[in-house]
Amino acid sequence: MELIVALGIGVLVASGVWLILRPRTYQVIIGLSLLSYAVNLLIFGMGRLRVNAAPVLEAGAAVDASQYTDPLPQALVLTAIVISFATTALFLVVLLASRGLTGTDHVDGREPGT
Amino acid sequence: MSGWLHHLIIVPVLLPLTVGAGMLLLEEPRRRLKASLSLFSTLVLISVAIALLQLAQGNGAEIGVYLLGDWPAPFGIVLVLDRLSALMLLLSSVLALASLLFSLARWHRAGPHFHPLFQFLLVGINGAFLTGDLFNLFVFFEVMLAASYGLVLHGSGTARVKAGLHYIAVNLAASLLFLIGVALIYGVTGTLNMADLANRLPAVATEDRALLQAGAAILGIAFLVKAGMWPLCFWLPTTYAAASAPAAAMFSIMSKVGIYVILRLWLLLFGADAGSVAGFGGSWLFYGGLLTVGFGTIGALASQDMSRLAGYNVLVSSGTLLAVLGVTDMAITAGALFYLLSSTLAISAFFLLIELAERGRRAGADILAVTLEAFGETEEEPLHEEEEAGIAIPATMAILGLSFVFCALLLAGLPPLSGFIGKFILLAAVLDSSGTATVSLDAWLLLAAVILSGLAAVIAMTRAGIRTFWAPLGRSVPRVRLIEITPIGLLLLLCVLLTVQAGPVMYYLQGTAEALHAPQRYIEGVLSAPRAGQTAQGGGA
């Protein structure tokens, strides 16, 4: 499982980095989204990967910490998802404004060579 | 620190948040009400910041810790008030007042939601100064950045949207790096509380150390993008030049947020007590800072436009600070803080001044007129023009020219103003720090960088000044309203005060630097902070 997660993160980061270096704004925004997915998976991985373990303690029962997964990265991922969703939406608006004002979807606001 | 005074710590975050959120409910035409609310919030922030400064100073050893939700320190999120954060809070609220006053003349009408965005920017900046938790720092960074994305586009126009597109893309990528750094550090140490982190660092196992250092380095890159270290700074001059004047004046403290976080985290985590990881990355800061100074200096000499000149001055200021922080010496840190105060005030004043000086001869003015037409109500206009004619200031060019000379002196670091004192303290401390009779090569490099960047600032500012004030080609005298020149005067007056009162200020800053270089007190203060429930029982309240 570790290998699959690591490969998944690696592929996402590689595609994301390639895309944000592309000249079209739409590619940049997709690249940033892929990168943020990769980062979220990485945060999960940093809480150690566990299967079939609950993050929330049961009330009343005696607590054995080794039976639970780390709940903190899950909270962090949740926050990160919300924030990156909001900023991506905002970026999309700017992207559309730029398209409207400059008439091109190149990141520099003009086609190369013109 | 007890009772209601304790709750003052959270006011710099809560107040702008509430006011900003409340303003979203108001309709767009009710600008007067929004402006008064915004002004009220900023004025209260200044008084709260002064009160917090006194608390931080008065307690000396003790630091103020605010446990959110009353969870004990390493588990819950904390806000921490010490001398450094109190100082930065005061600086940001003073700059906020100046920018806000300036914007009231015309800029706040140039687009929707200026006041709420401005308040949210303050939430982010103040929160970043106060927080004692890495992930919380990320959240406040994002709040600050999201508001700044809106502010950089304020006033619209092709130039702003183009610059904003790059600015947002760069900062989104930097935020992702921030998250990667935080995740790696959490993976190694299992904590996000800065004080707890500093405690656990020396005990990190040798095989995990590389991962930890990688995490810290990636985290550092995220802050250095914000602070504008070369080669992460190419977005900065364009963005700051494109932003509207009040927004640019506030952005000059956003670069300092990056510097603040580096100063705070680096001395806390990799200070002298950190064992095997002590001083990690110091030479990167030092040489990176020097290169930034070099890049900023060349850029300042090359820039034709005053706004770009100001942007490159931001880089010179950031670079100088990064380089001297890399030296890690208590006296130098105190000098650096003085330089930070003086240069931030001066650059903000300069950004505001540029808009006035270039008014009437700049293409941007036409864009502004168009957007004002699009967003402003027509019935307000005649009244507004009367108003403008009523309190325009006399001898406009003389006053603008004088303010420009002040800014030039401050940025170049010439006597008699605080820019000179700041650089003098820095250089004296650098020469002292070698300890021996011979001065090290690094010290010479730093000395040369600071002095040459000052010289270049004189040349660039003189050229810009001659072009703007002495050789006007068919320009009309700009009409400047009292409310626009007052904030510039306020900022410059503060610099003069900083010059006259340099002794007491330095005394405070030395205390700050000592506390930063001996973080044990900070760590203990945070980790042993009493919960409100416990104090209530103990005090019988």
Image (cartoon, coloured by chain):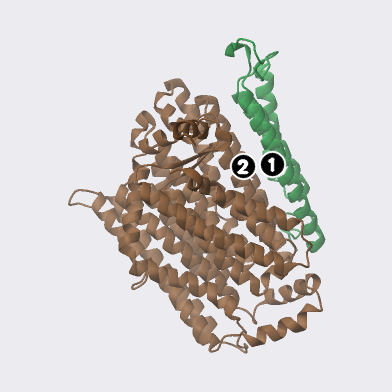
Say which residue appears at 45% left-offset and 43% top-offset.
B2
Tell me, by letter, which chain the rendering colours green. A
Q: Secondary structure at mark 2?
A: helix
Q: Amino acid at mark 1?
A: Ile
Q: Nearer the viewer, residue B389 or A105?
A: B389
Q: Look at the image and tell me in which quarter the N terminus of chain B lies.
A: top left
Q: Secondary structure at mark 1?
A: helix
Residue B350 visible in rendering: yes
Side of A19 where B414 appears, left or right: left
Q: Nearer the viewer, residue B241 or B298?
A: B241
Disc 1 crowd rating (10 Å Cα; few below 14, some 14-19, many 20+) is some
Side of B67 where B155 appears, left or right: right
Q: Nearer the viewer, residue B404 or B507?
A: B507
On residue A83, the disc is 1
Q: Amino acid at mark 2?
A: Val
Label 1 to label 2, Cα distance in Å?
Answer: 8 Å
Q: Are marks 1 and 2 in contact (CB under 8 Å)?
A: yes
Q: In the figure, residue B538 lies in which quadrant?
A: top left
View extreme (front): residue: B540
**Residue B258 percent location from the top left of the image:** 51, 49
**Residue B541 percent location from the top left of the image:** 49, 37
